[in-house]
Image (cartoon, rainbow, N blue to C red):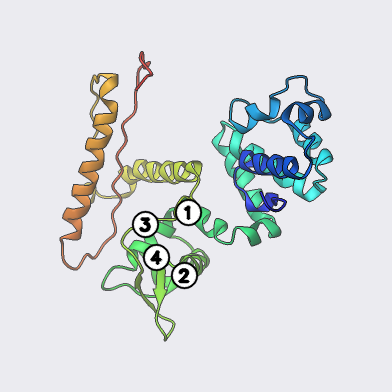
Amino acid sequence: MEKLPQIYDYRDYRAFLKDLIDYKMSVEKRLSFRRLSNLTGYTTPNHYQKIISNQKNMSPRGAREIAKLFNLNPAELKILLLLMKYNDSKKHDVKINALKKLIKNQKYRLHNPNVEEVYKYYSQWYYVAIRELSLLDDFQDDPQWIAKTLIPNISVAEAVQALLDLTKLGIIKRGVDGKIVSAVQQHIDFRGEVPSHTIANYHKNMINMGRESIDRINRDERDITSVTLPIPIDKISELKSYIKDIQNNFREKVHSYNSPDSIFQLNMQLFPISVVKNKNI
């Protein structure tokens, strides 16, 4: 590292810790991992190497010791502690809460300009729906029309904010007159910007909507099916690829139709309902 790393530039505290230690070692030749452990009160000489390599998590005490040793201010320590929860917690709700707090931090948002909009895109089901809605021939660039067209309905304020965020992300494009032209691309790719738990949150929302559609949507406008099967665990990878092929074929079939007039959601889930005896998939 040629310059001191800033915690606000990171979404993985281990990457920050590695860069911070590398930088300090480059300017303080006597500093080593063994000495670093001793200075922060740990007897294991490779304590921080294990954290960086994801063999163990850093404790709040360890974070405070690092902050004290490397002169991180209270605001930077707060971000470090939030990133630790965000990266290390096994609980989905804890991760989401940590991310929300990171997003609320003005300096963190400044260093990660799209993080809030990307989070919203996958956290609020109607962001994706509005993006697809904009592809319809009869689409109306009107928050009231959008709000009442989606099922379930959303508020006009939610539609307004979604349009602003989708435009900021470049997902929908406006012409010189300010009106929406179309979605910019058929496939959305944020190039690694989307955390896995954010995608998981999106899937949870869509699975819940599928469940609710049983009561909300007429049977002739939906298809809800399931099948329970015995499967060799070593064939899961092959079957996941097969499901991906089904999705791609379904997408190609849909894209071959002219003048789509409605937005549908296709969910596919494959999961065990008995103990997996061999986990070496």
Task: Locate residue 142 relative to residue 32 in the image: left or right.
Answer: left
Judge depth for marks 4 and 2 and give the one in front.
2
Residue drawn 60% across the image and 43% down it: 12
Residue matched to label 3: 151
- Do the residues under discs 4 and 1 have CB atoms within 8 angstroms? no
Question: What is the C-alpha distance between the residues marked 2 and 1?
Answer: 16 Å
Question: What is the C-alpha distance between the residues marked 3 and 4?
Answer: 8 Å
Judge depth for marks 2 and 3 and give the one in front.
2
Residue matched to label 4: 148
Residue drawn 33% across the image and 46% down it: 213
- For this orientation, the residue located farthest to the top is 277
Q: Secondary structure at mark 4?
A: helix
Question: What amino acid does circle 3 point to?
Answer: Ile
Question: What is the C-alpha distance between the residues marked 1 and 3?
Answer: 13 Å
Q: Secondary structure at mark 3?
A: loop
Q: Nearer the viewer, residue 132 or 32?
A: 32
Question: What amino acid does circle 1 point to?
Answer: Gln
Residue matched to label 1: 124
Question: What amino acid does circle 2 point to?
Answer: Thr
Q: Position of residue 169 (x, y in %)?
A: 48, 65
Judge depth for marks 2 and 1 and give the one in front.
2
Q: Is residue 25 visible?
A: yes
Residue drawn 36% across the image and 13% down it: 277
Q: Position of residue 16 (x, y in %)?
A: 65, 44
Q: Position of residue 87 (x, y in %)?
A: 59, 38
Q: Secondary structure at mark 2?
A: helix
Above/below status of 43 relative to 130:
above
Question: What is the C-alpha distance between the residues marked 4 and 1?
Answer: 16 Å
- Do the residues under discs 2 and 1 have CB atoms within 8 angstroms? no
- For this orientation, the residue located farthest to the front is 29
Label 4, residues with CA under 10 Å away: few <14, some 14-19, many ≥20: some
Residue matched to label 2: 167
